[in-house]
Structures are given as C-alpha cells and as structure tokens.
Amino acid sequence: MPEGKIVKALSGFYYVLHNDQLIQCRGRGVFRKNKITPLVGDEVVFQAENEQEGYILEIKDRKNELVRPPIANVDQAILVFSAVKPDFSTALLDRFLVLVEFNHIEPIICISKMDLANEEQMEMIMKYAEQYRTAGYKVMLTSSETETGIEQLIPLLENKISVFAGQSGVGKSSLLNVLRPDLDLKTNDISSHLGRGKHTTRHVELISIGNGLVADTPGFSSLDFININAEDLTACFPELLKASENCKFRGCLHIHEPKCGVKQGVESGVIPSYRYEHYVNFLQEIKDRKPRY
C-alpha cells in the first residue's frame, strides 16, 4: 500500500502528498469508531484509484500533536509576536512557550513589525530578546515590510515541519508571503475596536518553502494547560529547569520550599522576575484546574 503525508485538511477531505502528487482522501470509518482524527502532518497508509478517490487506511505513530491548531509531527514552532500593533506581551509569549515545550517542539521566537517600533519600544524589545536568548531560545527580529531578518529565518526552515503560530494580527501570513510571494495569502489589518487582528487563515495547510514544510495556522482561540501537571511546568522554562538543579528538595515547585535554586536565581537577577511570575501564575492555574473524569 502507498504511504504519504497529509498536507491539507478541508471539509472532511485529507490531501495526501505522495511522490509529488496530491491525492484527495477520506478517512475510513474505523477512525471515527476509535475516536482518531487524521491530522495535517500525519504519515499515513492509503489506497486510491485516482487523484480524487482515496481512502486513508492507517495513521502512523505520531511524535507529537497539537489540538489548536490541529497538526501532528511538528519539528519546530515559529512563535510570531509583533513588536507593536498588537503590543509585545511576555505573558502571552510564555504561555505559548510552555505549550510548545511541553509537546517537545523546538520554539523559535520571531518578533515581527520591527519597522513600526519607536526608539523606546525598540529598546524594550532588544532587552527582552537578549533575555530570551540567555534563557536558551532562538530569537529573530523581523519586518515583512523591509524584509529585515527574513534571510536569517529561511535556513531554519530547511528539512523541518514548522508551524507558524501566534495571536491573530501579528503578521504570520505577511511573513509567509515574503518567504513565498506566490502564495499571496490574505492578510487583514488590526481591528481598531477589538485591538487585535481578524482571523485570515481558516484551515491548516503545509506549504513547501525551500526544502521545508510550513504550516500557516488559524489563530489560537484557547491556550489552556489541559494536559500539563504541576510537576511538568519547571521543564517548560529552560532557565528554571537549569536552576532547579540547585534546589535542596526533589520535586521542588519553587514557591514556599527553602533552599530553592530557582528563587535564588530570581533574587540574583539570573532569572528575569517576569518569567518567574508567569511560572507562579501558570502553576496556580494548573492547581485550580477542575479535575477531568
């Protein structure tokens, strides 16, 4: 049986890439019975009489999967956050980073719309960029308008499945249009009433850029920590994980425990206070979560 990769899902159809050919497939009823939904990024076994009438028979094991956006087997997430319009938010960025880290996806922070930042905003962004780099993250400073930073972004996409993610209005589609002008993806301005962008991407699709595949995804409508436990959270903050090696007690949650390496790191300035504050807030959110039955 032939094998391929789902590169697009739309209206109940799954488009499978096989030997540079796109086959339109439906999922077999067995998937619904077993409550398994084929996802963009899935490696699948299928059968097809022609390009229009295929059926997915088997979904290969996934190395990871996301719910919002629905995509599987992602190598890295390009987290696009604008310098302004909407304003850069470390709290929202850290929420994205936790979800990406928890799913074992490598995050790359891409700060867009740098051409719109004034001197004060530019200085603030540069400070944050350096702090996130010190924590261990790759940080790119870009502008779709001037194409600043785009050349540095392209090599990072090679031979990877990358997902472009971030709140709506930050310029994800604009960046992809610069990377591949023939896409001509629809973009919208920020809503002056809501202060955020309007959703322009309605479905998940893998787009070839160079030798890589990139997903332009609908904006995240929810960023909750459904599957993350309190004990998992430290590992989602690289600098906290490193500092936790100096904690006296195993399983330290870095709140009230004495001789805590993380709190010492915050006090000494090695760990930015806002990163620790976000950790504390997220931990409380996880503890307050209603148990699922």
Image (tube, rainbow, N blue to C red):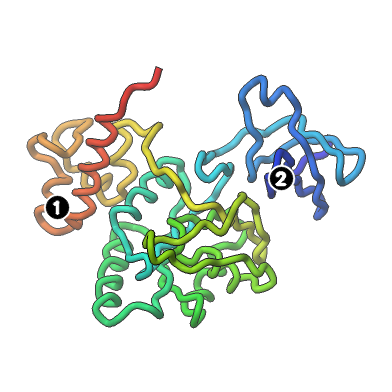
Which quadrant: the N terminus? Answer: top right
Q: Residue at x 80, y 44 (%)?
A: 24
| Foreground pick, 200 / 153 | 200
Residue that label 2 marks: 5
| Foreground pick, 219 / 159 | 219
Which quadrant: the C terminus? Answer: top left
Percent x, y of residue 169: 45, 63
Is residue 31 in sight in this rendering? yes
For the residue marked with disc 1, what is the amino acid? Val
**Is label 1 or label 2 in front?**
2
Q: Which residue is drawn at 84% across and 35% down?
A: 47
Q: Residue at x 32, y 64 (%)?
A: 88
Of all residues, the one furthest to the top in this rendering is 293
CB under 8 Å between callouts 1 and 2?
no
Q: For residue 174, what is the image quadrant? A: bottom right
Q: How crowded is mark 2: few (under 14 residues within 10 Å), some or many (20 or more)?
A: many
Q: Earlier in the sequence, mark 1 or mark 2?
A: 2
Q: In this view, does 23 lie above or below 150?
A: above
Looking at the rendered structure, the number of numbered marks drawn on it comes to 2
Q: Which residue is drawn at 17% across and 46% down?
A: 262
Percent x, y of residue 187: 56, 67
Percent x, y of residue 205: 64, 52
Q: Is residue 210 above or below residue 49?
A: below
For the residue marked with disc 2, what is the amino acid? Lys
* SS at badge 2: strand
How far apart are the two marked residues, 1 and 2, measured between alpha carbons? 45 Å
Residue that label 1 marks: 266
* SS at badge 1: helix
Q: In this view, does 192 lie above or below 122?
A: above
Q: For residue 120, what is the image quadrant? A: bottom left
